[in-house]
């Protein structure tokens, strides 16, 4: 089982379809940054929906997530989770094996030449953001802390969909929104059940072979 969903933070918070626990509400209230608070609440909404879809209904109950390493439910360690957010978007991946997801909205004025040299990626925007998200998703899958030194240790290698352990997409800039890049890292990634917002048109930017979990 491998599931990936990308959703609008505004849409998730407007719907409020999944009851959150008292602990989750308290943690959100303790976040000083409003954007960070919104990201946290939206991510929990999306995560709870994906869990409900696989029979893990926990309305109002706390989600006992591990505090360190790759995120997983302490009472269901076979279910592996990964969450990412950037700008107005949040993504959540759920799998029965190690998984990592990363999304990154293009940032005008970012030093792609310098950062690309630091992590071993080309400075052309699509090449840079594809490599960046793939590398971050690999570290999320393994539970390692993200840093430039770790991001520079390896480079994605193109692979056929059947042999790939990662896939990447780009949602091109439109209507004033910056381009959004998405990477999913998991063995058997070609089998992923992916949910994109109806208003978006993602295009695949590659399938890749990455280091094992």
Image: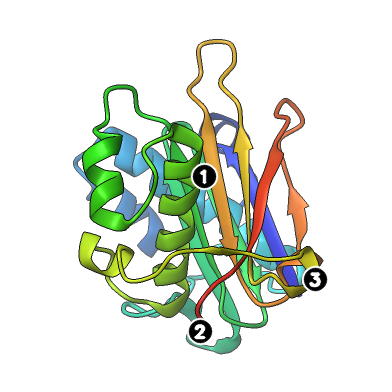
Q: Measure the C-alpha gap from mark 1 to mark 3.
A: 27 Å
Residue at the farthest top position = 175
Q: Residue at x 53, y 34 (%)?
A: 180
Q: Residue at x 67, y 57 (%)?
A: 4
Give x and y (percent) for residue 26.
Answer: 31, 55
Q: Residue at x 42, y 33 (%)?
A: 87
User: Can the viewer see residue 21 in this picture?
Assistant: no
- 143 displayed left or right of 190: left
Nearest to the eye among marks 2 and 3: give it: 3
Q: Residue at x 43, y 34 (%)?
A: 124
Q: Measure the C-alpha gap from mark 2 to mark 3.
A: 18 Å
Q: Which mark is residue 162?
A: 3
- 40 displayed left or right of 30: right
SS for tag 3?
helix
Residue marked by disc 1: 90
- 202 displayed left or right of 33: right
Residue marked by disc 2: 213
Above or below, 72 against 197 in this view is: below
Q: Quadrant of residue 187?
A: bottom right
SS for tag 1?
strand
Circle 3 packing at 10 Å, graded few (<14), some (14-19), many (20+), is few
């Amino acid at each position: 089982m491998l599931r990936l969903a990308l959703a609008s933070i505004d849409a998730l918070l407007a719907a409020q379809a999944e009851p959150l626990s008292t602990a989750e509400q308290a943690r959100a209230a303790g976040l000083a940054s409003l954007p960070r608070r919104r990201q946290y609440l939206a991510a929990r909404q999306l995560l709870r929906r994906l869990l409900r879809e696989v029979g893990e209904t926990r309305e109002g109950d706390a989600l006992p997530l591990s505090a360190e390493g790759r995120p997983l439910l302490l009472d269901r360690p076979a279910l592996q989770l990964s969450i990412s957010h950037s700008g107005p978007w949040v993504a959540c991946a759920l799998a029965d094996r190690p998984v990592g997801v990363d999304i990154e909205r293009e940032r005008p004025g970012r030093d792609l030449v310098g950062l690309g040299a630091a992590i071993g990626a080309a400075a052309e925007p699509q090449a840079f953001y594809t490599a960046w998200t793939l590398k971050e998703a690999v570290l999320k899958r393994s539970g390692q802390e993200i840093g430039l030194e770790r991001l520079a240790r390896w480079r994605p290698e193109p692979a056929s969909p059947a042999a790939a352990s990662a896939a990447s997409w780009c949602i091109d800039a439109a209507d004033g929104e910056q381009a959004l890049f998405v990477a999913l890292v998991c063995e058997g990634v070609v089998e992923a059940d992916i949910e994109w917002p109806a208003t978006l048109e993602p295009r695949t930017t590659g399938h890749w072979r990455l280091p094992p979990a």
